Image (tube, helix red, strand yellow):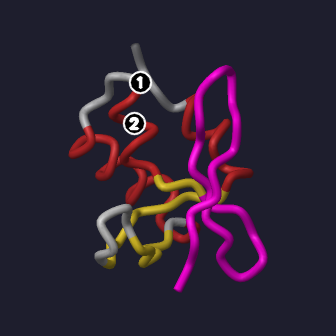
Amino acid sequence: MNQIIPVSFHNDSLAIVDHDGQPFVPMRPVATNIGLDWKNQHAKLTAKFGPTVVIITTVGEDGKDREMVCLPLRKIPAWLYSINP
């Protein structure tokens, strides 16, 4: 099972998941924390970054398995550039 690793980022915490030796970012918390609609962002991620998006199962704080849509950390800048204010 993949474990969430909290990383300090600008006085906040960013979740990282190690998947096959690479850092991945669970995208729903990032999108909602910056005020974006998750449904629209999920569609964009699937359309623009489909080959690199993975579903990773982790154990949540409540001890239950959770599936998370994750993007490789190296792709986060490209996703941020794709946001249209």
Residue position marked by numbered label 1 in the rendering = 34
**36 sits left or right of 18 in the view:** left
Label 2 close to label 1 by CB (< 8 Å)? yes
- Residue 40 found in image quarter: top left
**66 sits left or right of 2 in the view:** left
- Residue 80 found in image quarter: top right
The residue at the point 59 percent across, 41 percent down is: 14
Q: Nearer the viewer, residue 57 or 55?
A: 57
Q: CA distance from mark 2 to mark 1?
A: 6 Å
- Residue 66 found in image quarter: bottom left
Q: Nearer the viewer, residue 52 or 33?
A: 33
Residue position marked by numbered label 2 in the rendering = 31
Up the image or down, 76 lies above or below 1; here it is: above
Are there few (<14), some (14-19), or many (20+) residues within 10 Å of tag 1?
Answer: few
- Tell me if residue 3 is in the magenta stretch: yes
Numbered disc 1: secondary structure: loop
The residue at the point 68 percent across, 70 percent down is: 18
Residue 30 location (% of width, % of height): 45, 38
Residue positioned most to the bottom: 1
Residue 16 location (% of width, % of height): 62, 56
Residue 82 location (% of width, % of height): 51, 32
The residue at the point 68 percent across, 21 percent down is: 10
Numbered disc 2: secondary structure: helix
**Amino acid at dot 1:** Ile
- Tell me if residue 19 is in the magenta stretch: yes
Residue positioned most to the front: 62
Up the image or down, 34 lies above or below 78; here it is: above
Quarter of the image that includes the C terminus: top left
The residue at the point 33 percent across, 22 percent down is: 35
Up the image or down, 33 lies above or below 48; here it is: above
Give the residues drawn in magenta, as a range: 1-24
Are there few (<14), some (14-19), or many (20+) residues within 10 Å of tag 2?
Answer: some
